[in-house]
Image: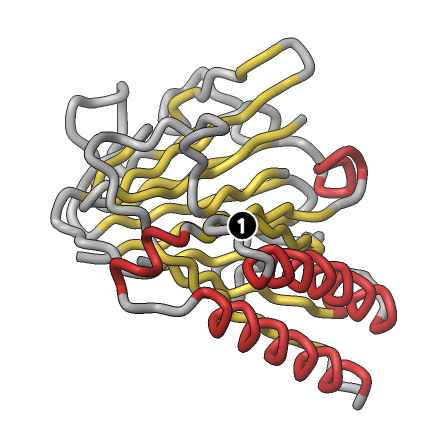
Amino acid sequence: MAGDGNYGGNGSVYWQVHHRSPTGPEPLKNKNKSSTNAKADHWVDLGVPGNIPAKTGNEVKGHDPTPVANISNGTGRFRVHLYFSGAAATNLGVDLKLVLGQLISDAYAQMSSLSAGNPDAHLVIEVPAVGRASEPTGTTSDPWEVSVSW
Amino acid sequence: MAGDGNYGGNGSVYFENHVNGQPAGNGSDSSAQPHMFRLSLRYSTESGKSNPQLRGLLQAGISSMTAALTQLQNGSNDVTAHVEVPAFQRETPPSGGWEVKIQW
């Protein structure tokens, strides 16, 4: 029914993806096992056939069978949560106020493009990566820089 | 050195993650020294949403970003914002033009 993908840094990049049903986390099956129903199951494709191996290919694909119309409490939308860290921006020599100001201008420009009749708008957002000393935890005190949920 | 996460729908949700060489599951790209995460969000009438609905979603995102900017101007060091992107209902699994793409 739901899921999220999370991205954060601590000098390197960590990511994780969860699928969740109303009863809790949803285990992901190996798409390449014959017992997996590719249309009905939550699955992950690790890029190699057979049982889930110790080492994977260089691409991971996943499938959450929740109908798109039902995601994010029935809105049919991906929800993108952004965390702008002042310390991370300072470390990069970036002024967060300028970043957000430019982002707002860009978003208005995309709205104008849609108003002019264009069927597609693209918004690019840059978020400073946090230089943590340890893995990101995703807790309130240590939020992911980017979290996508559905 | 780089990677991306992509999310899209075709009646159900697909995601795809690439990391330059390896990992899977909960992953770590230890070769990367990230500076900025770069998100590309796509608002398209191909999602089934009307042009005014797309503008409404963008306006909601602008409101969230404006509130975050105001917090910064009032002295906050860290702020959050959120945006919503309509998922496509494709006939086939997405192969590009993802609604949400994350690169580092």
How many circles with numbers are drawn on the protein? Answer: 1
> Quick one: B80 or B37, which is closer to the camera?
B80
> Quick one: A50 or B13, which is closer to the camera?
B13
User: Is A18 situated left or right of A93 in this image?
Assistant: right
> Quick one: B47 or A48, which is closer to the camera?
B47
Point out the residue furthest to the front here. B75
Q: Which quadrant of the structure image shows residue A30?
A: top left
* Residue A149 higher or lower than A32, as above or below: below
Q: Which quadrant of the structure image shows residue B99?
A: bottom right
* Residue A36 higher or lower than B52, as above or below: above
* Residue A2 higher or lower than A29, as above or below: below
Point 48% across, 74% down: residue: A98
Point out the residue furthest to the top here. A23
Residue bearing mark 1: B79
> Quick one: A144 or B16, which is closer to the camera?
A144
**Residue B71 x/y as whole percent:** 61, 55
Point 15% across, 48% down: residue: B21
Q: Given the image, on which type of amino acid does mark 1 rest? A: Val
Figure colour scheme: secondary structure
User: Is B1 situated left or right of B24 in this image?
Assistant: left
**Residue A97 x/y as whole percent:** 50, 68
* Residue A131 higher or lower than A97, as above or below: above
* Mark 1: secondary structure: strand
Point 23% across, 41% down: residue: A10
Q: Which quadrant of the structure image shows residue A13?
A: top left
- Circle 1 residues within 10 Å: few <14, some 14–19, many ≥20: some
**Residue B87 x/y as whole percent:** 68, 52
Report if residue B90 is visible in the image.
no
Point 76% across, 59% down: residue: B60
Quadrant containing the N terminus of chain A is: top right
Chain designation of label 1: B
